[in-house]
Amino acid sequence: MNEAFRVIGDTTPGGILIEADHASAQVPADIDLGIAPALLGQHIAIDIGVAEIAELLVERPAFAAFLGNVSRLVCDFNRDEHGPAVAPIASDGHAIPGNALDHAGHEARLARFYRPYHAALTDLIDRMQPALILSLHSFTPHLASRPDEARPWHIGILYNRDRRGAGLALDWLAGEPGLVVGDQQPYSGELLNATMDRHAEARGIPYVGVEIRQDLIGDAAGQRVWADRMERLMRAVQASL
C-alpha cells in the first residue's frame, strides 16, 4: 500500500474500476493540520461511506478499486494540480491553518501525494483497460456554510462533456422506487470533475460519477444496500454501452 493510495480487487483487463479520491481521513503523523480531531470524521475530511462500499464491491467479480489513502484536507486529489484547493486553507467554514503553505510547502504536498496518486492511477488504467469507471463520492446533507440550502437528493450523477455513462445511469436510477436523483446535483461535474476529466474523459473511457448522501451510507446496513445498488447500476450501464 502506498502512502497516497491503495488498490484492491480484481484488476483483470476489461472490468469495472472504482475510483474514490476522498476515501480516507488519514493524516500522516508529520503533518499538523491545526484542527480539532473530531473534524476528521466529518465531510470536510472524508467522503463518508465510500471506502466501505468499494470494499464490498471488490468482493464481487470484475471489480477493482483505487482509493485515496489520505484525507482530502491533506491533499485533495480531485482538484487541479496548481489550484489552492489541493491543500485547502478552509472548508465549509472551518479554517485549516496547517495548510497555510508557501510555494515550497505546496510543491512538497504535490510531490508526496498528488503526483504519485495520479501517476499510479494512470498506470493502473493502462494495465487494466477498464470497460467502465465508477467515480465514487458522497456528500453531506447539510452544509454548515449554507444552512438554508436544501439537499434532498439521495444520489447525484455528475459528468462534464462525456454523458454516455451518466445518461444510462440516470435512466436506470429513474426505475429505482423512492429515490430522489440529482442530474448534476449537488453540484455540477462541469465544474468539479478533475480526476475524471483527466483519467476518463481525456482517454475516452466511459464513466459514472456518483455522489451518495452520507447519512444513507454512514453505517454497515446502508453501505450494503448501496453497494448492491451500485453493482446493479454499473453492470446495467456496462451492458448498455
Image (tube, rainbow, N blue to C red):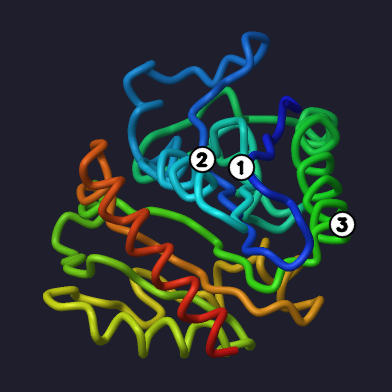
Q: Position of residue 231 (x, y in %)?
A: 43, 63
- Looking at the rendered image, the disc whose residue lies closer to the viewer, 3 or 1, is 3
Determine the residue positioned at 49% across, 40% down.
55
Q: Residue furthest front?
A: 61
Instruction: Identify which amino acid the numbered label 3 is placed on.
Output: Arg
In the drawing, does residue 78 fall left or right of residue 11?
A: left
What is the secondary structure assignment of the residue under circle 3?
helix
Q: Which residue is mark 3?
A: 127
Lower sequence index among marks 2 and 3:
2
Using the numbered discs, state the Cα–Cα distance from disc 2 to disc 1 in whole angstroms: 6 Å
Q: Position of residue 117 (x, y in %)?
A: 76, 43
Asked whether the beta carbons under mark 2 and mark 1 sit within 8 Å of each other, the answer is yes
In the drawing, does residue 156 fall left or right of residue 87?
A: left
In the drawing, does residue 9 fall left or right of residue 125?
A: left
Q: Which residue is mark 2?
A: 23
Q: Which residue is mark 1?
A: 67
